[in-house]
């Protein structure tokens, strides 16, 4: 009988606790629906573990933070880093070419100084960059007269299908000048990225018509819309749905134009940026998959409680900082919601580095790994001669390794 009474009490307490969190205000009218992820593919066959990415060198260690995007254009390697800078690397030197945002005191104020993420180029000598806090920009790197001059293409104030952008992430440009880009989440900014794991996805794939200067939503409700890449003939575009471990294929031409399908699912990690080299697509998995990431979708009540708990903690730090301004409270508020906290936790488990080579049908051809934990969190790759460069939103260096056999 005592056991039954204890069980009833526990049920009452649990019900009261859930009720308490339910009554707490939500930051963005978030919803929490049940979903199940496709089980991850086994690490066998073309996914079998190896150490072909072990032993990578660390370039510019402690000189840069978070080289997220990489593009090699006109014999020059360009990258996007923290503190709002787009840089080029020439003769082992880092040269800033453009800056977004305003001066700030550190990474914990990236909403002020900007955070450029995805980067690409068109066929006319311009770079295109997605800044998570300031929008989509076009940068001149082909004329000495206005070298580094930037033009804003999409503003964070632009209302697109009734919603303003919140987290511009990746960008691709077609041969006719059409710009495709992702808004990773419609509610949460990058410094609140952890929340996007818990709430229902509101990410979007968007097309910008350069002639009409108009944005059109192609896909929505993606659970963190991330990297995108056009096919060789531009008949379709791929978009990574990072938090569901899959990649979508959106048809731009042909009888299926305007439709989408699953390109690849059940990935053993979170896909980030996508790079097409020749006929192949290369998918780095920025964080390896674990039980929490795989199963959290099946517990909507737990997700709701975790979201509101984080919100309370975040607001507590912000309120305290408003009364007692100091750098520690600012950093704490930043760390609570930022993906950097996940990177830190991931390091405790000796993170696996994985890059996939995929054909246009979504078949994994081969994979490259490292389990040493020395280099991890890779989000994009670039090949220059016989070297493979490894970008990361987390690392304080740019990784490089001799191009593995069979990579191309």
Image (spheres, rainbow, N blue to C red):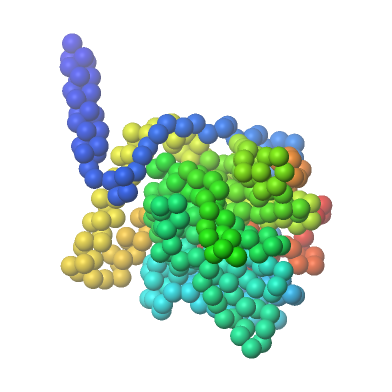
Query: Residue placed farthest to the bottom in the image?
Result: 145
Which residue corresponds to the image point at 48% horizontal and 40% vertical from the top-left?
Answer: 293
Toward which corner of the image does residue 317 lie, by quadrant?
bottom left
Q: Where residue 391 appears, x then y in whole percent?
A: 61, 62
Given residues 304 and 31, the one toward you in this image is 31
Q: Quadrant of the C terminus?
A: bottom right
Q: Where residue 339 appears, x then y in whole percent?
A: 45, 55
Toward which corner of the image does residue 320 lie, by quadrant?
bottom left
Which residue corresponds to the image point at 29% horizontal and 55% vertical from the top-left?
Answer: 314
Q: Where residue 164 appears, x then y in whole percent?
A: 41, 57
Which residue corresponds to the image point at 42% horizontal and 41% vertical from the top-left?
Answer: 200
Residue 15 seen in the figure: yes
Is 403 positioned to the left or the right of 17 in the image? right
Which residue corresponds to the image point at 64% horizontal and 35% vertical from the top-left?
Answer: 41
Query: Residue placed farthest to the front in the image?
Result: 212
Given residues 364 and 406, the one toward you in this image is 364
Q: Is residue 56 above or below residue 90?
A: above
Given residues 57 and 220, the one toward you in this image is 220
Q: Is residue 279 above or below residue 76?
A: above
Residue 285 seen in the figure: no
Is 390 positioned to the left or the right of 319 in the image? right
Q: Where residue 178 appears, x then y in whole percent?
A: 63, 61
């Amino acid at each position: 009988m005592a056991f039954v009474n204890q069980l009833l009490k526990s049920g009452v307490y649990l019900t009261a606790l859930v009720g308490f969190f339910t009554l707490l205000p939500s930051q963005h009218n978030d919803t929490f629906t049940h979903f199940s992820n496709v089980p991850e593919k086994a690490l066998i066959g073309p996914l079998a573990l190896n150490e072909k990415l072990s032993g990578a060198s660390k370039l510019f260690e402690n000189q840069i933070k978070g080289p997220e995007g990489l593009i090699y254009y006109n014999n020059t390697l360009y990258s996007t880093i923290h503190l709002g800078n787009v840089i080029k690397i020439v003769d082992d030197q880092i040269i800033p070419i453009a800056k977004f945002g305003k001066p700030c005191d550190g990474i914990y104020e990236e909403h002020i100084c900007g955070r450029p993420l995805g980067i690409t180029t068109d066929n006319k000598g311009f770079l295109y960059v997605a800044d998570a806090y300031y929008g989509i920009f076009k940068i001149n790197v082909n004329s000495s007269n206005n070298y580094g001059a930037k033009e804003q293409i999409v503003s964070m104030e632009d209302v697109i299908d009734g919603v303003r952008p919140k987290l511009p992430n990746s960008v691709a440009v077609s041969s006719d000048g059409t710009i495709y880009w992702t808004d990773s989440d419609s509610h949460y900014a990058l410094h609140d990225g952890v929340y996007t794991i818990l709430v229902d996805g509101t990410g979007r794939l968007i097309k910008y018509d350069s002639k009409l200067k108009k944005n059109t939503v192609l896909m929505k409700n993606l659970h963190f819309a991330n990297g995108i890449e056009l096919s060789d003939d531009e008949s379709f575009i791929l978009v990574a749905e990072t938090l569901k471990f899959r990649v979508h294929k959106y048809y731009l031409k042909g009888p299926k134009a305007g439709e989408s399908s699953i390109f690849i699912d059940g990935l053993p990690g979170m896909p980030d940026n996508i790079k097409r080299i020749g006929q192949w697509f290369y998918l780095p998995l920025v964080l390896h998959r674990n039980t929490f990431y795989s199963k959290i979708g099946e517990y909507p009540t737990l997700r709701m409680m975790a979201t509101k708990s984080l919100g309370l903690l975040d607001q507590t730090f912000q309120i305290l900082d408003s009364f007692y301004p100091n750098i520690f409270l600012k950093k704490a508020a930043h760390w609570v919601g930022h993906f950097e906290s996940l990177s830190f936790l991931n390091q405790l488990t000796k993170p696996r580095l994985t890059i996939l080579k995929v054909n246009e049908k979504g078949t994994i051809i081969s994979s490259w790994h490292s389990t040493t934990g020395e280099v991890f969190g890779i989000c994009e790759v670039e090949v220059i001669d016989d070297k493979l460069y490894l970008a990361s939103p987390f690392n304080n260096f740019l990784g490089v390794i001799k191009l593995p056999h069979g990579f191309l």
